Image: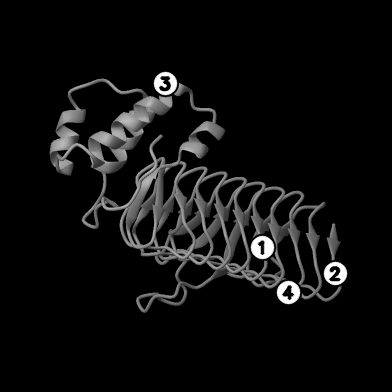
Amino acid sequence: MSIHSTAIIHPEAQIAEDAEVGAYVCIEGPSVVGSGCVLQPHSILTGSVRMGEKNLVGYGAVIGASPQALSYQPGTKSEVIIGNGNTIREYCTIHRGLHDGGATRVGDDNFLMAGVHLGHDTVLGNHNIIANNCLLGGHVEVANRVFIGGGSVFHQFIRIGELVVVQGNSSMSKDIPPFTLAAERNFIFGLNIVGLRRAGLTAQDRGEIKEAFKMLYQSGLNTAQTLALAREREWSANGRLFFDFVESAKKRGICALAATRETSIR
């Protein structure tokens, strides 16, 4: 175990033998740091943080701080749970859950660039890339293989679907359906065709996703009518994923197509 002499470690913290804890690191609570993790200088783990293997926590990052919510009660027993293989760069902030038993969750193999903020009870899936200075409010859900451009902000309680790309400096307060390109303020500009190919989806898979997209956004039907029509046929896993996501949208609804702009579904 490599722990710098200036690090301050809570007596109940559990640190793997091969973990590295840098200068002036502060672990303030009974956190768990798994095998192969690196905590770079001046990073802070506070409250209850459970971290899997091979995670990097960058300079000055703060993980496990109390939620930024007026309803938060000191002494609440909540936590941050982080999987394996994540890169959390300098000055990221990840806040713990708002209520007793709540948790902010980060899956595996995510890359959070400098200055990213994950609000309380956010759930981040696997293989996501979030560029610098993005802000995710409380209870935001991010699926898998999502790319979020720098400086983007997300309202609490929204969802971002599988293989979505969000343009930098966007502002989102509605759900973003899987496989789409989102930008500006709650607009969809087409499908993430390049991402679908890179993810290994077959031409048949991509064709079905295009058909689902056109049915939802370009058929002239409203959402309820589209969902009723979609239930009349069989879809593969990707088609079902798309329409299940749309059907489970809550009162904020889903992002609209930028109908007057050029869209990409080729």
Local SS, label 4: loop
Q: Which x, y percent locates residue 265? A: 38, 37
- State left or right for residue 12 relative to residue 137: right
Q: Which residue is mark 3?
A: 204
Q: Residues within 10 Å of mark 1 (few under 14, many from 20)?
A: many
In the image, what residue type sits under mark 3? Gln
Q: Residue at x 48, y 63 (%)?
A: 78
Q: Which residue is mark 2?
A: 4
Which one is earlier in the sequence, the residue at label 1 or at label 2? 2
Q: Is 134 rendered above or below residue 253?
A: below
In the image, what residue type sits under mark 2? His
Q: Residue at x 42, y 24 (%)?
A: 205
- Whether residue 255 is visible, yes or no, is no
Q: Which dot marks residue 42? A: 4
* Spatial separation of the CA atoms under disc 2 and disc 4: 11 Å
* Spatial separation of the CA atoms under disc 4 and disc 1: 12 Å
In the image, what residue type sits under mark 4? His
* Spatial separation of the CA atoms under disc 1 and disc 2: 20 Å
Q: Residues within 10 Å of mark 4 (few under 14, many from 20)?
A: many
In the image, what residue type sits under mark 1? Arg
Local SS, label 1: loop
Q: Which x, y percent locates residue 31? A: 64, 62
> How was this image coloured?
one colour
Q: Which residue is mark 1?
A: 89
* Spatial separation of the CA atoms under disc 3 and disc 2: 54 Å
Q: Nearer the viewer, mark 3 or mark 4?
A: 3
Q: Which dot marks residue 62? A: none
Q: Residue at x 55, y 48 (%)?
A: 128
* Spatial separation of the CA atoms under disc 3 and disc 1: 38 Å
- State left or right for residue 20 relative to residue 161: right
